Image (cartoon, rainbow, N blue to C red):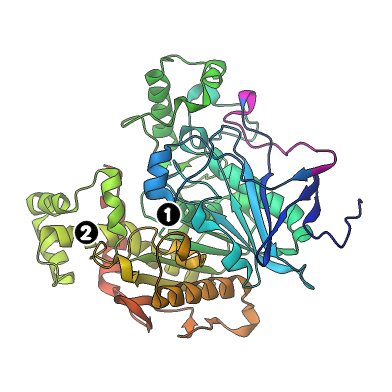
Amino acid sequence: MIQVPARDNCRVMTSNGLLEGKREQNVRVWRGIPYARPPVGSLRWRAPQPPAQWQGVKQAYAYGPASWQDEEYCRELGGGDPGSFSEDCLYLNVWAPATAPAHPLPVMVWLHGGGFTIGAGGLPPYEGHGLTQRGVILVTVNYRLGHLGIFAHPALDGEDSRGPVHNFALLDQIAALGWVRDNIASFGGDPHKVTLFGESAGARSVMSLMASPLARGLFQRAIIQSGYTLPDTPRPDALQSGEQVAAALGLKHATAEQLRALPGDSFWSLAAPYSPAPVPVSGDIVLPEPVLDCFMAGQQHVLPVLVGSNSDEASVLSVFGVDAAQQIRQMRKTHRGGLALIRTLYPHALRDDVLGREVCRDMAFTTLGQIISDAQKRVGQPCWRYWFDYVSDGERESLPFGAAHGNEVAYVFDTLATVITTTEPDRKVAAILADYWAAFACHENSTGHVLAGPVAWPAQGVLQIGLRRRFGFRHRRWFMPLRLRLFKRVMKHHVNLD
């Protein structure tokens, strides 16, 4: 084994070669580390392959390209400038303390959100300085997006000897976790103490890997931020959709060779009905069964979970063309009895738009916390739940309904100053959230199921972060019990992409 000079702790030896990072503030950073071969040419729509070896020192100074996507959309909704685009996008980034630790540190691996269509591991809110200074190693990951990341077509069936493969984005994430297992010790991390966390589509990815037999043992804790209850796309539907996409690109009876000959940027700009769904496909080797069914049956991987959502998740509905008020008007026509019941659960919501916003939020997002909590009880594992309702001082007028979808992310990373002009209460909330998240990653089961903070956070009930959109923390033993039990029952019939 090559010996790396002790004086230069920004150089680390990985299984593929010697890497050199940079020292920034109180951390060391390695950006743009390849964790798989470029998935281009004949490797498009195939499981990621191990990266190539290199000679000499590889400089890991700059983020690798993100998968092809809509740049303006990502700037507006995804967290900022995603940088350059390429089909060659399988790169990750590592942050570690400036001084090499005496003992291996817990590792946190972040999967970004963006509906499986936008985003990158190098977006400004995901900078790792804040979390790393709390005694963890942070890894952020790029993965294939859009139709390059989740795709099914009859011409591609049978290419993998293990069975059908459609969730290439999830396979990328699994490959990144495999790289962490094999290499993170060189950066000071503990490969046996990995927390996988993500928001929105990243949260759905965490859930998917908790349900995937291929990801078993690759992480030991999970954080699910603003996951949603949309059902996976069944494999037969995905195959039909793939044929329609190919036909829209001029390949009505496509062969695998013709599909792989299409330019990599052909897919991201396709509009409805050819745009990709914000969910994985069930029925392949990655997800043999639908994710939600797996959790409902208590068949997820057995590990501690932290899960929660925000008070105005309905802010994302317009992205999918959902009119909250119209949902209530439709119920008035077709489910008048059900609407009467729902109104008793939301006595303060007198207008259709307000009622629709809260019902859609709770059915699509809040109920997931109850589903995960119940699933954790089945397997005898702790589940910390939260409800994020803090709105920064400067955003109170523009966010009258509460914390919007994705608003908690910059608080979790303690990078709020990269997103907005902050006040003292804003900075305090960010510091506390980052402390809680790092505490979960560092938590030892032998110390009991309570996370320390301004409010002790036990693994039951819900921690409310923000009180009426302002600073405050409160532990709630009971949280929307009637609403969430009802919506868990009817969810499968009412939460869908239509």
For the point 26% across and 48% down, which residue is it? 318
Main SS of the magenta segment?
loop
Query: How far across and how far down the image is residue 466, in percent?
Result: 35, 76
Residue 297 visible in the shown view: no
Q: Which residue matches tag 1?
A: 200
Quadrant that contains the C terminus = top left
Q: Which residue matches tag 2?
A: 357
Does residue 50 belong to the magenta stretch? yes
Residue kind at label 1, given as amino acid type:
Ser
In this rendered view, identify the residue nearer to me: 125 or 234. 125
For the point 63% across and 70% down, which residue is it? 133
As measured in the structure, the alpha-carbon distance from the residue carrying label 1 to the one carrying label 2 is 18 Å
Residue 13 visible in the shown view: yes
Q: Secondary structure at mark 2?
A: helix
**Which quadrant would residue 236 be assigned to in this image?**
top left
CB under 8 Å between discs 1 and 2? no
Q: Secondary structure at mark 1?
A: loop
Residue kind at label 2, given as amino acid type:
Arg
Query: Of the numbered discs in the image, which one, if any, rests on residue 417?
Result: none
Q: Residues within 10 Å of mark 2 (few under 14, many from 20)?
A: many
The span shown in magenta is 41-57
Q: Is residue 55 left or right of residue 104?
A: right
Does residue 123 belong to the magenta stretch? no
Considering only vertical position in the picture, is 25 above or below 275? below
Considering only vertical position in the picture, is 346 above or below 121? below
Query: How far across and how far down the image is residue 277, in percent?
Result: 38, 40
Q: Is residue 149 left or right of residue 340?
A: right
Query: How far across and how far down the image is residue 497, in percent?
Result: 30, 43
Circle nearer the N terminus (1, 2)? 1
